[in-house]
Image (tube, grey):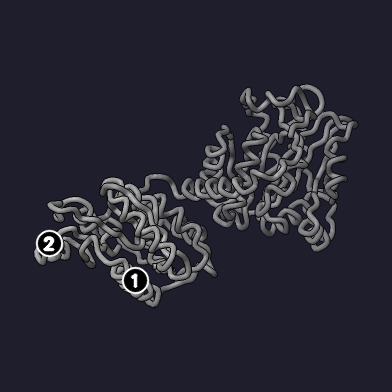
Amino acid sequence: MRFDAQGTVLLVSTDETLMQTMEQLGSESLRLTVRSVRNWERALEVLSRVRVDLIVLHVHVGESLTEGLLDELRHHRRLAVIPVLALLESATSEQVADAIDAGAADCMAYPGSHSELAARLRALARVAGRHRRKLTERHYNLSGDLTALGFTDLIGLLELGRASGRLRLLTSDGEGRVLFGEGRVIHAEFGNLVGEEAFFELMHLEKAQYEFRPGDPAAEHELEATIDSTTASLVLRAATRFDEEQGEARAFLPAPLTAVPDRSNGEGASWEPDVSWAARGEALLEHTKPLGELQLLSRAAYQAWSVERRITQRIQIWLVTDLHCGVQALSAVATPLADEQVCHALHDPPEALVWSLRMDAETRLEVILIDQDRPRTLIDELNRRPVAMIVAPTHGDFQTLDLDARSGLIELLTRWSPRGCVSIGNVMIERHVKELATLANRPLPQRGILGTLWNLEVDLRFAIAESLRLWASSTPVAVEPAAESDAEGPGEVAA
């Protein structure tokens, strides 16, 4: 039982007086949250969604103890560990014996003394607490701690290794379990939660010991494969849920003014795929000499640069990567700046690093560096739709991105809908980016490059050229009517 916070008691009864008594005991003397339901079918529904520490079951005269909730709890391993206090209206010795045999941890006559009821609840709470403390005191030869390796990173490593087996997590709240089959999460449990709800709850853990034991998940006792989504999809949906929860807290704050994206690349006519411009850009990038201009801009300077009137046609690409890696990669293309100075300025205060190459008097190829860990940093300053996005996570591993970073990428894709995406990373990167686009409800043609930008393993010129090829071969992506109904043209501003 969670002794550092309120526990939860599930009361199954139709007696209004008992409900009021339990509410009073829970709030005044036991520090328990009481949830009341009227039948065992509803109780099972609550147990599938809410973590419960104790169950109080009101048994009426003549009611069978071999059918109903006690029988259901006994046949579900994850629920059988929850202590049940049976309140018997006919507390004969035979009925008490039947209740104990059916799985009740304790019994008492009802109606009875309030002080006796409180004492029995406290006793069951102590039993539950000792059981959970015993779990947290276990030690394993192969063990780890989530403070050193986060849950998402741990899941990603097991996925990349195509591992099969059982991952156990021990916390002050009890034990969690995740089963893997060939690198995919197929089942999860945490307390009385099961399936995706349990997985989402485990993703919020910051402190826990873990142990992974390889083996055949089918050998698990009473295995129920409760998850059929990919691991990446689970992680991204958890990130979306977390972002929505955070958004509820921000809903009462005034919204900042943001530019509404439109079909065009900027001022002027719609900027459709152009094979000739892509070919010219590729030819320029074939040179090994420094090209273009690398600028570190303040927010105000970036806003002025982004609406510069002399440039009417702008082929813009967003580079989403680690700041140090992005500085290194961009410096290798253009005349380099001092890396330490640039990274310090990018971190505090936030500024923008941009690379631009003039292709003629009115056309410019641009690359904007976006921090992979804080993709929302410049989101309100971005004011034109990119022809492509380059996603190059740290060391080529998408699992290095945390939940907030992934939800930020989803927001970028949803708001700006780039024509395509070039991903740089391991063999899993294309699949992860595809799932990002699926969550953003946007079609996203993409190409993958194996490797990483770290230490210039992959030349950024090649990635930019691939972005131009992808843009040149793409077809215009339809923008939903709702997305452009708020604006009549480029530069329109909405709250």
* Mark 2, other Cα within 10 Å: few <14 / some 14–19 / many ≥20: some
Q: Is residue 22 left or right of residue 344?
A: left
Tell which of 470 and 235 is nearer to you: 235
Q: Quote the CA–CA distance across marks 2 and 1.
A: 23 Å
Q: Please, is residue 247 above or below residue 396 in the view?
A: above
Q: Relative to 445, does residue 318 appear above or below in the rendering?
A: below
Which residue is the extreme one toward the left? 94
Give coordinates of residue 306: x percent, y percent.
83, 38
- The picture quadrant where one finds residue 83 is bottom left
Q: Is residue 126 above or below residue 56?
A: below
Q: Which mark is residue 122?
A: 1
Residue type pointed to by label 2: Gln
Q: What kind of element bears circle 1?
A: helix
Q: Position of residue 308 (x, y in %)?
A: 88, 35
Q: Would residue 181 be visible to someone looking at this image?
A: no
Q: Amino acid at mark 1?
A: Arg
Q: Earlier in the sequence, mark 2 or mark 1?
A: 2
- Using the rendered image of the protein, determine whether residue 74 is visible from the camera's viewpoint: yes
Q: What residue appears at the point 30 percent right and 57 percent down from the top-left corner?
A: 217
**In front here: 45 or 284?**
45
Q: Are marks 2 and 1 in contact (CB under 8 Å)?
A: no
Q: Which residue is mark 2?
A: 95
Residue at x-position 59% and y-position 37%: 446
Q: Quadrant of the C terminus?
A: top right
Residue 223 percent across, percent down from the top left? 27, 55
Name the secondary structure under disc 2.
helix
x 72%, y 45%: residue: 461
Which of the 4 image quadrants contains residue 260? Answer: top right
From the image, which quarter does the N terminus lie in? bottom left
Q: Is residue 260 left or right of residue 79?
A: right
